[in-house]
Each structure stands twice: as C-alpha cells, then as structure tokens.
Image: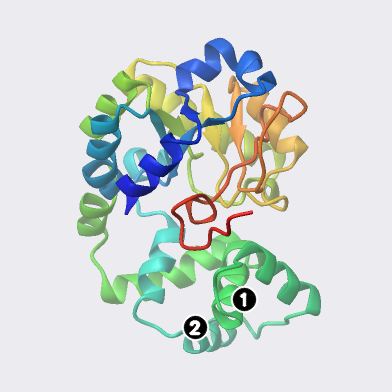
C-alpha cells in the first residue's frame, strides 16, 4: 500500500530531501512546481524496517522525527503507553478510570468540538478520550496514572526495544540525512512553560547531534495542532537552532509560511490514501 501510494505521488510531483530544503528552500517554496517531502513521526522501528527499504528502492528521501526521551532516559513516551493501554481497554472504560482517579472529568462543548477537529478519523468517544489525555490533563498526574496502568500489562524495557529505533538505526538515518527531532518527551509543546519549551526543543536537538555527529535542522512538533505549536514555540525553535518546523495543519507551503510552522498533509488525504477525494 505504501509503495503503491508513493508511485502514485511520484507521477504527480518530485520529492525533495531535507538537504534540498536546507540548501534551496526559498527556491522550492517559491516554485510554481509541486514538491513532496515525506515525513514520519515518533521514531518507530517499523518505519525503519518496513518503510525505509521501499523509500530506498524508489530513491525517495524522507525524514524520521524521533524523541530523545526513548534513548536518553530509556523510557517509553507516555503517548505510546496510552496507545498500548487503549488497545486493551475500551474508551468508555478508560474515561471512567480517569474520572475515578482524577476527581471527575468536566467536559465542555468546546472540548467536544476541539476533540473532533483534532481527531477527525476517530469516533466521538475515542476522540474525546485522546483529546483529554493529550491536552487537558496535568502532565505529571497523567504520567503517574498511565504508568500505573501500563506497568500492569507491559514490560517497559521490552516495549522500548520493540517499538523504537535503535541508536545504530538512528545513526544510519543521520548519515542519509533522514533524521529530525520530535522534541524530548512528546508533550504538546505550547502548553508548557517557556523554560520547558526550550528544554524540549533544545535537549532533543543536542542529544541527537551528539549521538550522530550531524546537525539536526528540523523539528516536527508533537500533535502539531494550533493548540500545541504556536508562534512562541516557533520562535524558541528558531532560537535553539532549527531551520524548519512542521505542524499537522493541513495545507501546502509557500514562502509566505513561517518556516518553523510549516503545514503537512496526512498520507491518507493524498492520492492513494484511504480518505483521498479527487477534486
């Protein structure tokens, strides 16, 4: 399916690499021609094992954005603990569990609307659960609650080894120019204090640069929504040395865009994707 979609896209436009953007970004963004830039978030081992060989076969560049927490702290990201716990606990039961451990959950109409906009491919209950977990709960409380549930069902070391890129794989990606930062902890960056924002952006960059001995010039913000990556986040990203930053706001990019807040399409919304609508 992935290979088929890449071949469809290849017929419509050229693919550019991270180095193309670094060296000729203005020209590319100002061009009347269309270009594709392939990205993957979360630094998952399956991306290296299954997607990378296809990309190499078709000679298509990409960037895999990874979190430093998984390698520096040897911890599974809370967002992925949530994914795994959700795979064995129904959304309704999960919400009840959160309510019991969080002195209830107050949900507004605005929360419903934001959840729907953030998670357009999920049913209402699932979207609300994901929105509440990712944007509404205090991070410390969330990590404590999720860790307690996660530890009952999973072994963290095993998940780390099986879920994420190895350090050798990260080094190999960097040699190809395929590595970017996804911050340190995978938190919604804009909801943090300014000091915490800088840590998330800077620590990940420095960690991967030290590990790979290559410059990390690009960051993809976790979640990528307007609530999680603001102009303040972009300013801090630029200040710590990033040249390009990527959101999940849908749309094309031109020179009019803030280079630290570039748009991205979900692969499902493009030719060959399950939600693609021609025209």
Residue contact between numbered discs 2 and 1, judged by CB atoms under 8 Å: yes
Dot placed on the residue nearer the N-terminal end, 2 or 1: 2
Location of residue 126 by image quarter: bottom right
Can you identify the residue that label 2 sits on? 91
Residue 239's spot in the image, x, y percent?
67, 21
Residue 250's spot in the image, x, y percent?
65, 48
Distance (Cα) linking label 2 and label 1: 9 Å
The structure residue drawn at horizontal position 45% and vertical position 31%, both measured from the top left corner, is 180
Closest to the observer, 222 or 10: 10
The structure residue drawn at horizontal position 58% and vertical position 23%, both measured from the top left corner, is 242
Q: Secondary structure at mark 1?
A: helix
Q: Quadrant of the N terminus?
A: bottom left
In the image, residue 132 sits, relative to residue 118, either above or below, namely: below
Closest to the observer, 40 or 185: 40
Q: Is residue 92 left or right of residue 42?
A: right
Q: Is residue 220 left or right of residue 138?
A: left
């Amino acid at each position: 399916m992935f290979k088929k979609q890449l071949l469809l896209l290849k017929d419509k436009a050229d693919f550019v690499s991270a180095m193309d953007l670094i060296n000729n970004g203005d020209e590319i963004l100002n061009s009347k021609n269309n270009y594709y830039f392939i990205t993957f978030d979360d630094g998952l081992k399956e991306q290296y094992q299954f997607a990378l060989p296809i990309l190499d076969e078709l000679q298509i560049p990409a960037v895999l954005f990874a979190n430093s927490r998984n390698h520096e702290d040897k911890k599974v990201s809370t967002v992925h603990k949530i994914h795994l716990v959700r795979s064995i606990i129904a959304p309704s039961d999960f919400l009840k569990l959160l309510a019991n451990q969080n002195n209830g959950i107050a949900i507004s109409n605005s929360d419903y609307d934001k959840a729907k906009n953030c998670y357009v491919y999920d049913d209402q209950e699932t979207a609300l659960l994901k929105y509440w977990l990712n944007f509404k709960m205090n991070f410390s409380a969330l990590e404590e609650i999720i860790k307690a549930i996660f530890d009952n069902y999973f072994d963290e070391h095993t998940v780390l080894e099986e879920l994420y890129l190895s350090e050798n794989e990260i080094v190999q990606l960097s040699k190809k120019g395929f590595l970017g930062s996804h911050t340190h902890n995978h938190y919604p960056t804009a909801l943090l204090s300014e000091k915490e924002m800088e840590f998330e952006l800077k620590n990940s960059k420095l960690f991967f640069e030290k590990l790979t001995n290559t410059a990390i010039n690009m960051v993809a913000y976790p979640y990528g929504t307007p609530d999680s990556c603001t102009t303040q986040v972009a300013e801090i990203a630029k200040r710590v040395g990033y040249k390009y930053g990527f959101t999940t706001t849908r749309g094309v990019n031109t020179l009019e865009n803030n280079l630290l807040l570039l748009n991205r399409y979900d692969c499902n919304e493009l030719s060959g994707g399950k939600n693609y609508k021609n025209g």
